[in-house]
Amino acid sequence: MPKPYSYDLRQKVVQAIKLDGLKISEASQIFSISRDTIRLWLKRERETGEFQALPNKPLGNGHKITSWEKFREFVEVNGDKTQVEMASLWQGEISARTISRALKKIGFSRKKKLMVIESARKLND
């Protein structure tokens, strides 16, 4: 995400428009800022009283599974069911894909163990 303009520059631009009577188009040419950006600052100042940059918060993921110990116990009890069935049994609304990702995260796998296959080969040989 691009870095926001400094508060100092914002103050200079807004003061030039309000106190010096500079037009928005003139201020945009002098300070090399788009007119829409200046309009956004002025609008924000009218609405909130401040034209400070909004904080950059990375978009987060609202995790559906918060207690991993509880999920492990749930998997031990319901490990024989399909992911769709597990999703319907889990309290709250959760998708089968979320169950899949959570199973992968805790290291749960339904694959057959390689040792079982090798031991069967040895008996056949």
Image (cartoon, rainbow, N blue to C red):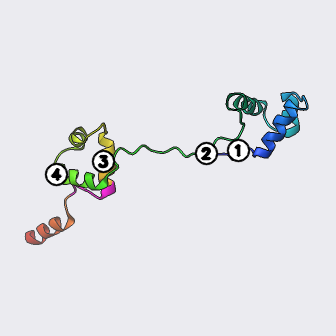
Residue 66, given in percent of the width and then of the height, sits at: 35, 49
At label 4, the amino acid type is Val
At label 2, the amino acid type is Asn
Q: Is residue 124 left or right of residue 5?
A: left
At label 1, the amino acid type is Pro
Question: What separation in Å lies between label 1 and label 2 (alpha carbons)?
Answer: 9 Å
Q: Is residue 1 left or right of residue 77?
A: right
Rendered residue at 76%/44% (across/down): 7
Question: What separation in Å lies between label 1 and label 4 (alpha carbons)?
Answer: 51 Å
Rendered residue at 78%/40% (across/down): 10
What's the mark number on residue 56?
A: 2
Q: Residues within 10 Å of mark 3 (few under 14, many from 20)?
A: some
- Label 1, on which residue? 4
Q: How many marks?
A: 4
Would you say the magenta stretch is mainly helix, strand or loop?
loop
> Which is nearer the N-term, disc 1 or disc 2?
1
